[in-house]
Image: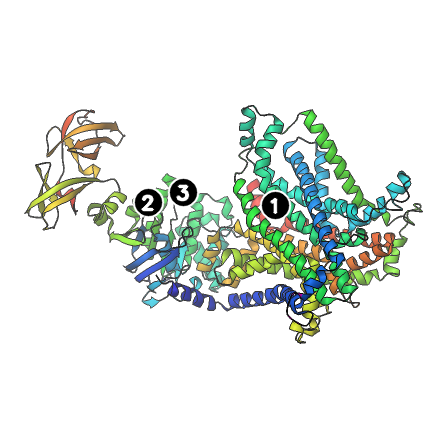
């Protein structure tokens, strides 16, 4: 049987659609140039960096005790943070889905899940130092401990756990809601105690999902740059070691090889997570909850769980609140009254705050719509269209999810500072705002694409087919049907991209040049120097911007979103 | 339509069309559609009928342009259209899920194709209004599609396809999401509108009664190939295989021996008893008589002796299962009131008129 004619007709039909062809070509170029190429150049550098092809660079870095120690450190932290975050996330999710809580506690939970989204990555490190450090509010003033050391292993573990567990909580919540209550009722009915039901029914059903959450956190943890940088002290992880290797030791091939090692670790984790656990999770939890679950009202279960979770939630919220409050004290750790706005003033008068906010704001504002549109186009192509390069586009945009920011940063330095393949071609790009915008886009593209894909999967394929059949070309189908139908997803992708960009640091810190002042880089610098009050003032303004844009998005979706008309109609 | 000259309907020709798919489990290629040739006359209503997986929808989607044939050429109004994308083909499709645009109201849904064709606004208004009148949705223009019932949504989908005056109208199981009563009502509507406009229509369904009610011609498909084509009467009374006979309504197959001819009929023996069967065959020997349940009469006297095994009152008919020799025969005795009712265990005779029977060579 020959499928040649069908294939060639499909190709001809595609070629007869210039918009589509151009889009695909541009997309492939973009993905190749800004995701694949920087990673490829790292491989090239690490294999031929010392002049000859071979493993000499790898041999060299594996002989550095700092590097091998960093690998152990990273894996150790990642493992512990993964376990802790998953466990706490599960507990929170279980309490929310299974236990009858009062409204106040629910509000706390919501806040906890929201905070890490809108805050810059290192806020918790900052407040950890300010609360529990040598001159920490709690350690020194409340408990009278003068030499508490928060820097190092435990500092990173605590801060990362507090940063990442809300993600696990949201994931587990989604899974628990999908468990059909009748499964558990059947087990109860046959005489199992509540604990046995959890152990024998709920937990086994959740197991792949737990594994999934663990690996996602693990990857986040080992890719995290900002927290280890701030609170790690002399406890270096791979991300910080690579950073120091390139900014301190100027060992570019060494840094490239280290980046390859880090990338291989995250890729392996990602592959397991994506191709094994995600499928298993979907396979075990296909059932939709057939009806509402009987909530646990038993006081011996309810009271301790609720109290534990509330205290943890309040603790996390307190850590976040510490930042804006810290910016109001005259001198952190020494003088607490009267509250003052002098640090906020200094942000703008003394520390070029306006410039920093303008640069960060403008670059993120450029990156956000491009990211949102790109991810919607990719999702549309992946979900709704059939063409040869589709697999490539999908794989590369998902691959970007597994690439730590530091790795990408090193890849961009090596890939673009001397032009493409060190030939000088496109050299002008390096050091410009454009390359920062591109990094922002690449860093947010996978999340946007993922949410776009899941939004589009819910739309009946024949709606677009009917538009196509009525005479619309690809561009018209996309603009008149697809985009309006996923407007909500597009808007939230827009804001997510904006928030992620304006709070990004790991790749950016390697690429930013003195001509651009970025807020996150500024905050990091001040925190490193111990100028916590000014760092807090910067961070507070940043949180206000990000939180404001999230509120704005919710407002827009509520009043102008696609679902509005539909919802109104349903209420009539 | 109201003073406008509707476009000429177009004929559709499939010339040895095949489509090959890969079985996702075994990785082997197989023919989803194999060597299908059709010639559909302009203005006629043709149904592609068959069980799921028979290739009927794939055939329709190849005509619409969503799938590309691996062999053969498709012609629309005499022009080859293999290389045209769906938006460039003069076809309009009504989808199983209606596929209405949820972000548009009824008017905008129907106007969509006209706007793409850059028809002036005044004309769009006129044509949409007319077509909505035709599908009896005149007062619904401003409704959102989710405010409509299933039947109304189906009418909008039909109006949206009709308003662009396509050379051929394609239906992909359009009624399968409606309840039984509405389905009957809508198929009459579709037929009425198709005839009023004189448009060519190709209709895919797995429901044989729908196919019979609506079509000029039925094309029955099985495993990617055409099993039989013909008018509903031809297919019903002269099926060319057990599959066709069985798919189009209930059917009995009675083994017999052909041993002579008398006019239009052949003379057969069933278990030694003589019967006449309408057939033009000149092959003598073993064969099967195809009998519809409603074509058989049961009485105290008749052609073939039988024993009653089931007798069941169904309202409009009395349902019997009787044993003729070794063969089970189903009978639908219409209007049973006033007739003798046989009970389980009774001995009786069945008989049939030769023109209601049909011979299958085995």
List x then y, in percent, for residue A195: 63, 28
Disc on res. B13: none
Q: Could you say whether the residue bearing mark 1 is in a helix, strand or loop?
A: helix
Q: Could you say whether the residue bearing mark 3 is in a helix, strand or loop?
A: loop
Q: Magenta span has A375? A: no
Write down the chain letter for disc 2. B
Task: Name the main secondary structure of what is drawn in magenta.
Answer: loop
Q: Is residue B84 visible?
A: no
Can you tell which of label 3 and label 2 is closer to the viewer? Answer: 2
Residue holding disc 1: A212
Marks 1, 3 in one chain:
no
Name which quarter of the figure residue A527 lies in: bottom right
Marks 1, 2 in one chain:
no
Q: Are marks 1 and 3 in contact (CB under 8 Å)?
A: no
In the image, is residue B311 above or below residue B36? Answer: above
Q: CA distance from mark 1 to mark 2?
A: 45 Å
- Tell me the magenta residue range: A51-55
Residue holding disc 3: B178
Q: CA distance from mark 1 to mark 3?
A: 41 Å
Residue holding disc 2: B207
Can you tell which of label 1 and label 3 is closer to the viewer? Answer: 1
Looking at the image, which residue is at 74% across and 54% down? A69
Name which quarter of the figure residue B294 lies in: top left
């Amino acid at each position: 049987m020959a499928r040649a004619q069908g294939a060639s007709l499909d190709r001809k039909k595609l070629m007869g659609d210039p918009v589509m062809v151009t889009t695909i070509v541009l997309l492939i170029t973009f993905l190749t140039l800004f995701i694949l190429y920087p990673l490829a150049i790292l491989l090239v550098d690490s294999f031929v960096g010392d002049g000859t092809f071979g493993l000499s660079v790898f041999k060299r870095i594996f002989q550095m005790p700092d590097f091998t120690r960093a690998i152990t450190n990273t894996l150790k932290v990642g493992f512990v943070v993964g376990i802790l975050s998953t466990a706490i996330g599960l507990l929170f999710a279980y309490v929310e889905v299974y236990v009858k809580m009062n409204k106040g506690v629910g509000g706390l939970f919501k806040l906890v899940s929201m905070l890490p989204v809108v805050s810059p990555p290192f806020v918790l490190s900052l407040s950890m130092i300010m609360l529990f450090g040598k001159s920490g509010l709690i350690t020194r003033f409340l408990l009278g401990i003068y030499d508490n050391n928060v820097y190092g292993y435990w500092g990173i573990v605590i801060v990362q756990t507090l940063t990442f567990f809300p993600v696990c909580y949201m994931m587990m919540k989604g899974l628990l809601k999908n468990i059909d209550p009748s499964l558990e009722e059947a087990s109860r009915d046959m005489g199992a105690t509540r604990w046995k039901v959890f152990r024998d029914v709920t937990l086994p059903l959740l197991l792949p999902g737990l594994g999934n959450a663990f690996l996602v956190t693990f990857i986040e943890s080992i890719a995290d740059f900002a927290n280890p940088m701030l609170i790690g002290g002399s406890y270096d992880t791979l991300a910080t070691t690579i950073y120091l290797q390139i900014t301190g030791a100027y060992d570019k091939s060494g840094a490239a090889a280290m980046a390859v090692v880090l990338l291989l670790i995250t890729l392996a984790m990602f592959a397991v997570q994506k191709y094994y656990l995600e499928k298993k999770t979907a396979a075990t939890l296909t059932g939709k909850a057939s009806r509402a679950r009987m909530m646990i009202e038993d006081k011996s279960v309810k009271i301790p769980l609720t109290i534990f979770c509330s205290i943890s939630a309040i603790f996390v919220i307190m850590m976040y609140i510490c930042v804006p409050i810290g910016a109001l004290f005259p001198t952190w750790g020494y003088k607490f009254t009267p509250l003052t706005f002098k640090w906020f003033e200094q942000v703008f008068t003394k520390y070029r705050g306006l410039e920093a906010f303008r640069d960060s704001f403008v670059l993120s504002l450029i990156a956000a719509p491009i990211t949102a549109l790109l991810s919607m186009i990719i999702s549309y192509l992946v979900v709704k269209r059939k063409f040869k390069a589709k697999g490539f586009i999908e794989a590369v945009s998902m691959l970007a999810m597994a690439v730590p920011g530091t790795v990408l940063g090193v890849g961009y330095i090596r890939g673009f500072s001397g032009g493409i393949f060190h030939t000088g071609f496109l050299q002008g790009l390096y050091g410009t705002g454009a390359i920062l915008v591109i990094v922002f886009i690449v860093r947010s593209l996978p999340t946007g694409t993922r949410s776009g894909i899941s939004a589009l999967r819910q739309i009946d394929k024949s709606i677009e087919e009917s538009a196509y059949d009525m005479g619309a070309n690809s561009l018209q189908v996309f603009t008149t049907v697809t985009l309006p139908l996923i407007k909500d997803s597009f808007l939230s992708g827009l804001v997510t991209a904006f928030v992620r960009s304006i709070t990004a640091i790991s790749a950016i810190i390697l690429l930013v040049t003195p001509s651009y002042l970025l807020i996150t880089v500024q905050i990091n610098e001040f925190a490193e120097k111990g100028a916590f009050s000014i760092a807090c003032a910067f961070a507070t303004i940043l949180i206000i911007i990000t939180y404001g844009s999230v509120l704005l998005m919710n407002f827009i979706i509520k009043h102008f979103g696609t679902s509005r008309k539909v919802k109104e109609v349903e209420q009539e | 339509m109201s003073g406008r000259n509707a476009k000429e309907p177009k004929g559709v020709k499939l010339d040895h069309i095949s489509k090959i798919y890969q079985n996702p489990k075994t990785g082997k290629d197989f023919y989803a559609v194999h060597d299908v040739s059709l010639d559909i006359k302009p203005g006629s209503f043709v149904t592609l009928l068959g069980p799921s997986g028979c290739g009927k929808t794939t055939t329709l989607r190849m005509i619409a342009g969503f799938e590309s044939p691996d062999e053969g050429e498709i012609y629309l109004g005499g022009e080859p259209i293999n290389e045209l994308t769906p938006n460039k083909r003069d076809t309009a499709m009504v989808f199983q899920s209606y596929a209405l645009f949820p972000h548009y109201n009824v008017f905008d849904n129907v106007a969509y194709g006209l706007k793409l064709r850059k028809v002036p606004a005044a004309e769009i208004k006129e044509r949409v209004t007319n077509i909505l009148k035709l599908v009896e949705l005149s007062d619904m223009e401003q409704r959102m599609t989710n405010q409509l019932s299933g039947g109304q949504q189906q009418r909008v989908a039909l109006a949206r396809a009709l308003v662009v005056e396509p050379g051929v109208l394609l239906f992909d199981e359009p009624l399968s999401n409606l309840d039984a009563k509405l389905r009957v009502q809508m198929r009459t509507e579709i037929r009425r509108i198709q005839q009023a406009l004189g448009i060519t229509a190709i209709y895919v369904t797995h429901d044989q009664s729908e196919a019979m009610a609506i079509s000029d011609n039925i094309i029955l498909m099985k495993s990617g190939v055409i099993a039989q084509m013909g008018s509903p009467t031809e297919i019903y009374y002269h099926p060319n295989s057990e599959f066709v006979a069985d798919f189009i309504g209930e059917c009995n197959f009675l083994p017999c021996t052909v041993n002579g001819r008398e006019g239009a009929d052949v003379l057969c023996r069933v278990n030694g008893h003589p019967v006449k069967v309408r057939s033009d065959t000149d092959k003598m020997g073993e064969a099967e008589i195809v009998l519809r349940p409603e074509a058989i009469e049961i009485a105290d006297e008749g052609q073939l002796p039988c024993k009653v095994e089931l007798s069941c009152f169904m309202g409009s008919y009395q349902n019997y299962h009787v044993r003729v020799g070794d063969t089970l025969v189903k009978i639908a005795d219409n209007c049973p009131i006033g007739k003798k009712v046989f009970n389980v265990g009774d001995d009786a005779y069945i008989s049939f008129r030769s023109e209601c029977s049909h011979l299958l060579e085995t």
